[in-house]
Amino acid sequence: MKIIFFYIRIIEKFIDKFGSAVSWIATLMVVVVGFDVTSRYIFHKSWVAVQELEWHLFGFLFLLAAAFTLKEDKHVRVDVIYAKLTERKRAFIDIVGIILFLIPMSLIIISQSYNFVLDSFHSLEGSPNPGGLPYRFILKSAIPFGFFLVLIEGIAILFKKFFILFGKENLLKENKIA
């Protein structure tokens, strides 16, 4: 039992710190987009590298912040029925969703993106566009890494939901797990 609480605490602490660090990408993205819009519409000058940087930053933000979003329960869902259910029924639905969808899809994406990323690293893939950014393989490596983070956070949530489902929420509180 202690190992489960240790796992939950370590993973959620890591995801919190990592999510805070990744959130700065949003600020950087605002600056880059602001620069691009200003240079394009005021100075009538545009660079392919700046436009690619915008979508690279968005890709990093989306992939690397997904686990933090999951942890904070801020992901998109249709709450028409879910919101009206008891905490135990919501825990059951979350357990089923994590086991049937989150874990298998994360594992599939991690395994299927492995060769995709490896090929990109071996060729030191960059942008095919003239004036584009080099090192596209770094962005591609965020795919399996981001889904690995979602997977480990999903497992932490799964453990917490089992405690809720079986009426042992007090054990989570006693072990200082929200």
Image: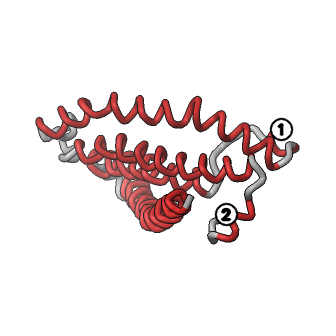
Eye-nearest disc, 2 or 1: 2
Helix, strand or loop at label 1? It is loop
Residue 149 percent across, percent down from the top left: 43, 50
Left or right of residue 10: residue 99: right
Crowding near the residue tagged with mark 2, few <14, some 14–19, many ≥20 C-alpha atoms within 10 Å: some
Residue 26 percent across, percent down from the top left: 47, 60
Q: Which residue in the structure is indicated by mark 1?
A: 80
Left or right of residue 18: residue 89: right
Q: In which quarter of the image is residue 170?
A: bottom right
The residue sitting at 51% across, 49% down in the picture is: 66
* Quadrant that contains the C terminus: bottom right
Q: Which residue in the structure is indicated by mark 2?
A: 172
Query: Can residue 155 be seen at all in this image of the molecule?
Result: yes
Helix, strand or loop at label 2? It is helix
Residue 79 percent across, percent down from the top left: 79, 41
Which of the pair 152/135 is nearer the observer? 152
Tag 2: amino acid: Leu
Which of the pair 168/129 is nearer the observer? 168
Disc 2 or 1, which lies upstream in sequence? 1
Left or right of residue 127: residue 14: right
The residue sitting at 43% across, 42% down in the picture is: 147
Image color mode: secondary structure
Query: Can residue 27 be seen at all in this image of the molecule?
Result: no
Q: Examine the rendered structure and indicate whether residue 149 appears above or below residue 122.
A: below
Q: Examine the rendered structure and indicate whether residue 109 appears above or below residue 165.
A: above
